[in-house]
Amino acid sequence: MKRLVKAVAVIGGLAMSCAYLSPLSAQAATAPVSASVTPGKPSHGKPTERPYTPPPITWSPCTNGLQVLGGECGHLEVPLDYSRPTGTKIKVAVSRIKHTSAESEYQGALVVNLTWPGGSALGQASVGKLLPEAVSGDYDWIGFDPRGVGASQPTLSCDPGIHGYNRLPYVPATGKQLAAQIKIAQDYSAACARTNSGLLKHATTVDSAKDLESLRKALGQEQINFYGYVWGAYLGEVYSTMYPQRVRRMVLDSSVDPKEAWFGYNRNQNGPLNQNFSAFAAWVAKYDSLYHLGTTEAAVKKQYYDTLAKLTKQPAEGTYGPTVWTDVFLLAYNTSHWKELAEVFSAYVNRGETASMKTLYDANYPTTTDNLQAMALSTMCTDAPWPKNWNTWIRTTEKDYRKWPFASWNNTWFVASCQSWSVPPRKPAPVGGLKTPPMLMVLDSTIEANSTYEGSLAVRKRFPKAVLVQSGVTPADSATPESCSPGRSITEYLHDGTLPSRVRGNTSDLKCPANALPDPTTSPATTSASPLAGVMATAGAADQ
């Protein structure tokens, strides 16, 4: 089951060379309205806050794809600034699919967030439908768009055209190109500052954890259950530290090491992304009779980099340049994309066709709105400090690029606006401790790009009652046998609270072997970014 849930996360907008590989929410597919709230005085340290009790959520049938599952949607009203609970209010979009079991079997609300900062999770109330009814039917499944995101009100937009097709190459070939990329990053942070939005100061993970606590109250629950992936997992880490008595069951999938949030975390993706791309190239070479891209990993990688150089000199059709090529192949971090990626690769290299490349790019990257980037940066830039000296950024990126050329520079440019962000960062949120409850941690692969194995071990240390289940050294979404899988552990844990035993030492508690990689000769490639796209499109969870 972990494999299925992970595939949902892929569609939901998760990892992605620092983060924006996913389609827009069906509920919020229009350009976001600029935030109209005015900024309040930022809170520093840990101010004394008066308790906030939200009004009840008014539920009505969802107007997105969740309606086919009987989903209900509404808005949670919360303070922009929790230190001023009677001040400006904002609205967090919420969805619900109610339990189907008898009341005697009801296990409460299970809130889902399988996203990167800035990503929509409103449609993820549908995740329960991927689990056995005997388990999923016992819960109310809750999705939500974090403050400022998607269908929440207001949203934030700084420069809607920031992600056009033909942008500067990620890898600067000259000092002039380097200076131009730095200026783009600074111009974007300046554009966000000009919005004068209070969301810039009040979109930290701590703010979202307080929203999660308000959601618990609005749902009338003494405790909540929670499933989080990547930033959703970090949100769970922070929430369970702030409100340990309010957690019933919690699954942290691909956890984020708090001390690495977010500069170190971003850098730590470079190695796994490079490894996964190499694994993809070796896999393509194995099926050269299908794709005609080379019979060795080295030959396939040469095709990729030669094409990148060609598109840098002359974008395809004058439009699709090196950034489109790079962004599309970032999808290689997950094996569920491999067959379609190989077909896109082969179509362009062997026949000069760009249609499938454009289709895949458009399905995974917003080109008409920057809401994802604006809110991702509003969270990450203020969650924790970033280097202020550009020499640090350039030096570390050049070092990584020499070892891992595939994604190091584009990872840097996605978050580079944090260097000049207008709002000072807060101190990192405390995470962990003896008071935190038992919970299940899962990791799909020890070379997952979204969350490093070392990061998951670090989080396990901070949560002495947590257990960590891992699969083998394979690219993400290489499923494990049901007899030993993170999915089986999740199902058992949600059903009756059963956890694998925690072992001594700095290691995972249950290690599972990986299954074989995809076989393109047995089934046709899908026409979207995930084999579950049809399921999730129906569910309305093709999120930002």
Image (cartoon, helix red, strand yellow):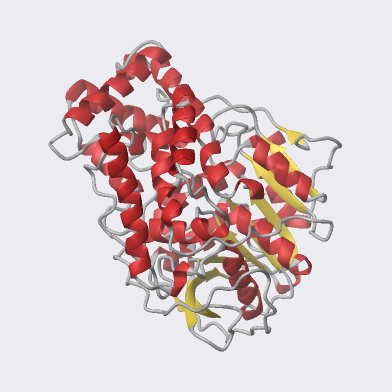
- The reply to whether residue 489 is in sight is no
Quarter holding residue 326: top left
| Residue 423 picture location, percent across and down | 47, 64
Q: Residue furthest right?
A: 504
Quadrant into which the C terminus falls = bottom left
Name the foreground residue: 434 vs 277: 434
| Residue 249 picture location, percent across and down | 73, 59
Quarter holding residue 286: top left
| Residue 395 picture location, percent across and down | 47, 33
Q: Which residue lies furthest to the top in this view?
A: 295
Q: Which residue is drawn at 36% across and 17% down?
A: 300
Q: Which residue is drawn at 43% across and 63% down?
A: 422
Q: Residue at x 32, y 38 (%)?
A: 178
Question: Where 169 falls versus 309 (above or below)?
Answer: below
Name the foreground residue: 511 vs 82: 82
Q: Residue at x 26, y 43 (%)?
A: 359
| Residue 221 picture location, percent across and down | 70, 75
Question: Where 155 falls versus 454 (above or below)?
Answer: below
